[in-house]
Amino acid sequence: MRSDPGAGPRASWPLRLAAWGGLGFLYTPIVLVAVYAFNTEESAFRFPPRGFTLRWFAEAAARSDLWSAVLLSMKVAAMSTLGAVVLGTLAALALARRTFRGGDLIAMGFILPIALPGIVTGIALSAAFRLSEITPGFWTIAMGHTTFCIVVVYNNVVARLRRLPPSLVEAAMDLGADRFAAFRTVVLPQLGTALLAGAILAFGLSFDEIIVTTFTAGHDRTLPIWLLNQLGRPRDVPITNVVAMAVMTITALPIVGAWWLTRSSHDPGGAVRG
Amino acid sequence: MSETSPARPAAPGLASRLSTALFHHRLLAVWLLLTPPLLWLGVVYLGSLLALVWQSVYRFDDFSMVVTPDVTWANYRALFRAANFDIVVRTLGMAAAVTLGTGLLGFPIAYYLARYTRGAAKGALYVSVMLPMWVSYIVKAYAWTLLLAQGGVIYWFADLLGLRGLLEGVLALPVIGGNSLATSNLGRFLVLTYVWLPFMVLPIYAAVERVPESLLHASADLGARPWQTFRTVILPLTFPGVVAGSIFTFSLTLGDYIIPQLIGPPGYYIGTMVVAQQGTVGNLPMAAAFTAVPIVIIAVYLVLARRLGAFDAL
């Protein structure tokens, strides 16, 4: 049957080499940061590491400026996630069925904040805040983040809505539910995991964002800005290493969770043959 | 029209009557849903963008360092001054190189992932590609300063394998070279390619997944060799995915201003120039004119990408 060796389950060795090599490229810096966090050296730039210690974790934990940056990042991410979930879900509900012309254009509008370079968004917002005499701080950061987080929620919810057969809602309404009841009892439960996944991704995006944030933050420091500042302090390298590793670990787990929640929409078998 | 007025004060049936009205007037329902997000997008985002574009035609006085709201094209003309034009060309060159680099590195990963893995292995591999995308940008940039540093991992390995001479030789080359890896264009290229690689892999993966297996069998049955099948069937069908990925890699490189500060030779990029103009110089109009460059380029890029079908691959 099989006439094409390339379509078999085994890839040719150059392809395997390129694929696994690429994956190795993706993970080398990540592994390096994780290893350096436990390094005993005071200026941990030398390779290989000199010895194993947990000392820097304690020292990092004692830094109050670190904790206030973490707290601010958490608050900003929570607020912008909330905004993005509300606005992104509304937009998705309106545009998922493509009921009118121009819907595509509006959908493109929501993509714009991530399609255009972050620096454009950042400087535009900072100029607008200055014009309207809004003092930069928590709210300006959260507004900026909400703007580019909307699309993440929107994408997740639209994908789910498009996989939801319209007959479900019709059945509910035939059984006497009005539009709101149908939404509450049929659509919303189906959206649950997509919303959660969108929220997690929005939170992660906001928590890590730095390009827009530097323009909208004023004197406040989110965690990424704190890290950027740390790069200019060679004596703090061990603490920077520890925080870098912690940030990586803490964001990785929820992201895997978000993928798990929406894995059916990534599963090509279901999408193509469905 | 009368049944669309939701203000009618019939308490018990209000919700159900509103529901009926919305059912009969789909467009009304759509617009009710759309108003809050559209207002946000229109006022906060597009409003700010327009304000920025508008300020790009304001006059900046070099002596008094003051911005006056007189309309002038001087800022845009200044973009074409040799020094500024160099910045644009330098940034575009890097963006193109990074896009090419991510494409070449990313295609095999995406292709392997889509065609040669099954079930749990595919899930695990997919997550392994996606995860680095979500690792904090600044942490990744920082990791590379450790990798590229003198005495860092790359130099250590080069010494170990006796390739130090080769490394120095590459760094001695014009354009891509520099005093050390951390201050060379090669280093900057590596970091940018690394940071944006997952953004290229995922759209290509989605595109490869969509190529029906039957086409490949048909191609093989008609006598095509694997390489021919790849060139004449797979590549044309997955190219929209590559274009979709390149939107991200190109745009993200164009607007970056942190990595060009941390790694690579001195000399402005569009991003660092914008920051310098609006921050230290206080010349917001010039900064705004500079941001018009990526806006125009990305707009043209998006139009072309749409023609190539890249939006279906997103």
Image (cartoon, coloured by chain):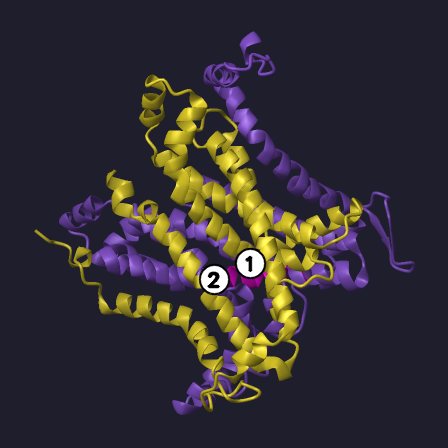
Chain colours: A yellow, B purple
Placement of A193 over or under B156, stated as above or below:
above
Specify whether B36 is left or right of A52: right
Kindly tell me whether residue B193 is visible in this rendering: no
B65 or A178, nearer to the observer = A178
User: Magenta residues: mostly which secondary structure?
Assistant: helix
B129 or A34, nearer to the observer = A34
Asked which quadrant contains residue B252, the reply is: bottom right
What residue appears at the point 48 percent right and 61 percent down from the top-left corner? B196
> Is residue B12 located in the magenta-colored stretch of the structure?
no
Query: Which label sits on residue B272?
Result: none
Q: Give amino acid for label 1.
A: Phe
Placement of A1 over or under B148, stated as above or below:
above
Q: Give amino acid for label 2.
A: Thr
* Residue occupied by mark 2: A251
Q: Residues within 10 Å of mark 2 (few under 14, many from 20)?
A: many
* Residue occupied by mark 1: A207
Placement of B120 over or under A149, stated as above or below:
below
- Mark 1 and mark 2 in contact? Answer it, CB < 8 Å: yes
A175 or A152, nearer to the observer = A175
Q: Secondary structure at mark 2?
A: helix
For mark 2, name the chain: A
Q: Quadrant of the N terminus of chain B?
A: top right
Segment colored magenta = B86-98
In the picture as drawn, the residue positioned furthest to the top comes out as B2
- Name the spot of residue A128 as percent of width and height, x first: 74, 46
How far apart marks 1 and 2 lie (CA) works out to 8 Å
Q: Secondary structure at mark 1?
A: helix
Say whether disc 1 or disc 2 marks the residue closer to the N-terminus. 1
- Name the spot of residue B141 as percent of width and height, x first: 54, 70
What residue appears at the point 30 percent right and 61 percent down from the top-left corner? B124
